[in-house]
Image (cartoon, rainbow, N blue to C red):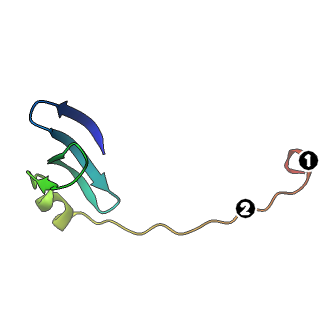
């Protein structure tokens, strides 16, 4: 969640949210986080045509002082 705005009189907040599989969309929810509702689906077409690959884990080993 980022770029949030709060309206205390109405008890609502709006914000942008994303995750690793979805780009930003606009949401509205109560100030306590309940009754969340997605307002936009702006990037659905982009993600359908994008080639997104999963990353892989890389394990590093420490080799003593200063990497030697």
Specify which label sits upstream in the sequence, 1 or 2: 2
The residue carrying mark 2 is 60
Q: Secondary structure at mark 2?
A: loop
Q: CA distance from mark 1 to mark 2?
A: 14 Å
Q: Secondary structure at mark 1?
A: helix
| 15 to the left or right of 21 | left
Most foreground residue, 42 or 66: 42
Residue 52 in which image quadrant: bottom left
Say which residue appears at 91% left-offset and 53% top-offset.
Answer: 64
The residue carrying mark 1 is 65
Most foreground residue, 26 or 30: 30
| 17 to the left or right of 58 | left
Badge 1: how crowded within 10 Å, few (<14), some, or many (20+)? few
x, y percentage for residue 30?
Answer: 17, 46
Say which residue appears at 28% left-offset and 66% top-offset.
Answer: 51
x, y percentage for residue 46?
Answer: 16, 58
């Amino acid at each position: 969640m980022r770029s949030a705005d709060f309206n205390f009189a109405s008890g609502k907040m709006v914000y942008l949210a994303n995750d690793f599989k979805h780009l930003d969309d606009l949401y509205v929810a109560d100030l306590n986080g309940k009754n969340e509702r997605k307002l936009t689906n702006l990037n659905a077409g982009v993600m359908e045509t994008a080639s997104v690959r999963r990353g892989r884990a890389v394990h590093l080993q420490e080799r003593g002082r200063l990497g030697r």
